[in-house]
Image (cartoon, rainbow, N blue to C red):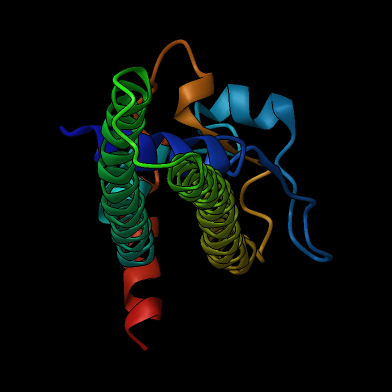
Amino acid sequence: MNKITVIVEVILTAAVAALFVLFFTVTPGAKKPAKQEIQASGELMPIAIINTDSILKHYTLAVEASEKLMNRYEESTVKLDTKAKSLQKEVETFQRDVVDFQRKVEANAFLSRERAESEQAKLQKKEQQLMAKQQDLENLRQKLSADFMEEQAALTQQLQDSVQAYLREYNADGRYHLVLNDAVLMNKVAGYDITDEVIEALNARYKK
């Protein structure tokens, strides 16, 4: 797994880490199983479990969001790297020009003082230009970072809204009092996991 993939998955995972700790109230008319009845009959508690990692890997919207963020990250990285390398070459050329100027001054190679001052003025102007380019590069870095975070927030919100909307519809009858992300659980208990069912329904809805 490359660095970009790790970064994007960390972002998405963190964004939806608490998504499935959702509390539901029983809808009017829905029967709320009594604790004693559940224990006596051996039925499962009104709790469901969803695996967040599976949602991120198999829900088409999450997969597309991850791909979109990776593309944005890669494009920003290439753009910054290209400009940084170009600027670095200009800096290296400038440094050589400065050394050459100093060597000429020490060797009294300039025909006149005016000539030396003219060359010095050119170097000072070039230095100011390089400083401005360095600031532009830093501004671009900050802008691309802000744009990336803005897009990440929008995609995350879209993902959250989509999953939460489906879970509320899925649980409209109040069958579950609590839906948990399995990351918060120490042990997994068979019979409570509804991940596959949820992913299948989410993808079916998304295709529409």
In the orientation shown, which residue stands out farthest toward the top? 186
**Looking at the image, can residue 51 be seen?**
no
In the orientation shown, which residue stands out farthest toward the right? 28
The answer to whether residue 160 is left or right of residue 32 is left
In the picture, which quadrant includes the C terminus?
Answer: bottom left
Q: Is residue 157 above or below residue 45?
A: below
Seen at 66% across and 66% down, the residue is 172
Residue 57, horizontal then vertical, whole percent:
27, 48
Q: Is residue 41 above or below residue 188?
A: below
In the picture, which quadrant includes the N terminus?
Answer: top left
In the orientation shown, which residue stands out farthest toward the front? 111
Residue 9, horizontal then vertical, whole percent:
36, 39
The answer to whether residue 4 is left or right of residue 188 is left
Seen at 80% across and 51% down, the residue is 25
The answer to whether residue 163 is left or right of residue 63 is right
Seen at 64% across and 63% down, the residue is 168
Seen at 36% across and 36% down, the residue is 7
Residue 33, horizontal then vertical, whole percent:
70, 41
Residue 62, horizontal then vertical, whole percent:
37, 58
**Looking at the image, can residue 123 be seen?**
yes
Q: Quarter-wise, where is residue 103 in the image?
A: top left
The number of numbered discs placed on residues in the rendered structure image is: 0
Residue placed most toward the observer, 177 or 113: 113
